[in-house]
Image: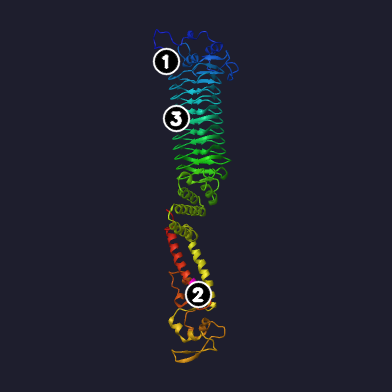
Amino acid sequence: MNDSGPPPGSDIPPAASLARFQPLSAAESKIVAHLSMGDFDRLGDGLRPEREDPARVVRAELLRVLILGKDEFRVHEKGLRLTGAWVSGILDLEGCRIPRDIGLKDCHFDAPPVLRSAIIDNLFLDGSSLPGLQADRLEARGCLSLRGAIVTGEIRLSGARTGDSIEADGATLAVPDGIVFEAAGLEARGGVQLRGANVRGGINLLGGRLVGDVNAVGARIERPGGVVLNLDGMAAGGDLALRGAIISGEIRLLGAHFGGDIDCSAATLLQPGGHALRLDRATITGAFFLRQGASIEGVLDLTATSIGAIDDDRGSWPQPGDLLLNRCQYGAFIGGPVDAASRLDWLSRQTPERWNADFWPQPYEQLSTVLREMGHNEDARAVLIEKERLQRRARRARARNPFLRTALAVSDGVLAVTLRYGRQPLMALLWLVLFWAIGVVVFALAERNGAIKPNSPVVLRSTEWTMCGLEQTERRFMPSTGQELTGRAKAGESQLTCFRRQPEATSYPEFKAVMYSLDVLLPVLAIGQKEYWRPDPTMPNGAFTLNYYFFQSVVGWALSLLAVAGFSGLVKSN
């Protein structure tokens, strides 16, 4: 209804004539008598009436006329201010233009006030008891205040616009099976204040535009099994403050944008078996706080979320399987652990299988990037190594051919122990050093046992080498000379040791186990030891030495190629 009164100069009696409300009750007479004072008119003790008291009953139709200030009813510039009234009937101000404040504090309303499409200054309903509020498309130049109010029906503010905040600090709002605060498309130059409120039912701020915060610090908001706080698509210049709040139900911020922080410090978020907090595709310019004993029972969904920084602690992390971080991007950790072991435990709380995926590599890449930018290079590398291990395990699980799975397992195992999947290519050098040291021992023992011989056919056919194979008490006919010659080896002396004593052997390169092992191991080097010496399989331990010779040659080739591939990045997963 839009009571604009009769046109100027009309002969029609004013609809707001006092006569139509006669007789006035004592409460109504007091209000009319004090219209021009601008102070609160207190009825009774000024407290909210708990029962209908004739001394406090005021008809809503009379209040409407007084608020509009028609004809003989000229209210103070401050507007109508009333406390402690029992308002009977429907206060219908739909479509009205009211250039003054409306102050109805600590009042009891029989029916929900109606302010749809109204234009007002400030509306104060602090401490009042209402069965709801119908204010879709309301335009308020100032604030809408429900601090300490008790509202047992739906508050409708869809498409409303306010010049300041909507304040419901300490209020009790209850529509247990539905939406208690419906404000889709709300535009406010302030914020929405619910500090310490007790809310049973859902809050819908879908697509809202706020300059300030959504502040529910210390509030208790309940809608188990449903969406308790819907902020999808909201754009807010301030924070979402949930410090110390207890919220039962799903909190949704799909595609929302907050210019400040999302603070869940010491909050308890409950939605067992479902999503407790969904920030899919949300943008948080500030930080996301989850610390000081915060608890999440349900899924924390940060899929594709953009966050300036994260401040959390281990005790506040969701349970395994209840964390989603795929494609989440964040700038830094400003609190909480920053070591690889702790953060890998954080990432391990994801369970891709629950969401029909086998592995998400991006969270590991993102974590590694952040740790590296913070100066934790070793921790960043450890994260990438774990990412490679898990990604390769997922790839093996996808392979249906058992032979392919076996081949992949062998390949992945080799890359794991040699190069850490290409993330630590210098490990190949350590393995080369290890095999070089083993080779030194093997070849040195072979030399001591005489299981090393010259790698020259000329030397092996020479008299010096041949006769050193016989002790000095033995003789052998040598066809090359046509003579029977005496052996040259002393009792118990090896052929190699005897050969080294011969004057003819002084020009032959000396065997060095250290350099020989290096020459066998590194295929790109030509030190010259392999060219002149080789294991003798006919001697004790000679067959083992020869086999190890071939093995070390193959290992040297493999490790060299792996090192090159590791430094070039060819073995890393994309």
Residue range in magenta is: 541-548
Are the residues at dot 2 and dot 3 in contact (C-beta closer than 8 Å)?
no
Residue 259 in magenta? no
Camera-nearest residue between 52 and 406: 406
Camera-nearest residue between 531 and 263: 531
Picture residue at 44% right of the left edge, 52% below the top: 398
Q: Secondary structure at mark 3?
A: loop
Name above or below for residue 280 compared with residue 166.
below
Q: Secondary structure at mark 1?
A: loop
Closest to the camera, between mark 2 and mark 3, is 2
Q: Which residue is mark 1?
A: 4
**Extreme residue toward the bottom, this view:** 483
Q: Which residue is mark 3?
A: 184
Residue 122 is at least partly visible in this image:
no
Q: Earlier in the sequence, mark 1 or mark 2?
A: 1
Residue 132 is at least partly visible in this image:
yes
Type of amino acid at the residue the image marks with label 1: Ser
- Find the distance from the CA under tag 2 to the CA under tag 3: 85 Å
Are the residues at dot 1 and dot 3 in contact (C-beta closer than 8 Å)?
no
* Whole-percent x, y for residue 113 in the image: 49, 20
Camera-nearest residue between 485 and 5: 485
Q: Which residue is mark 2?
A: 543
* Whole-percent x, y for residue 68 in the image: 46, 16
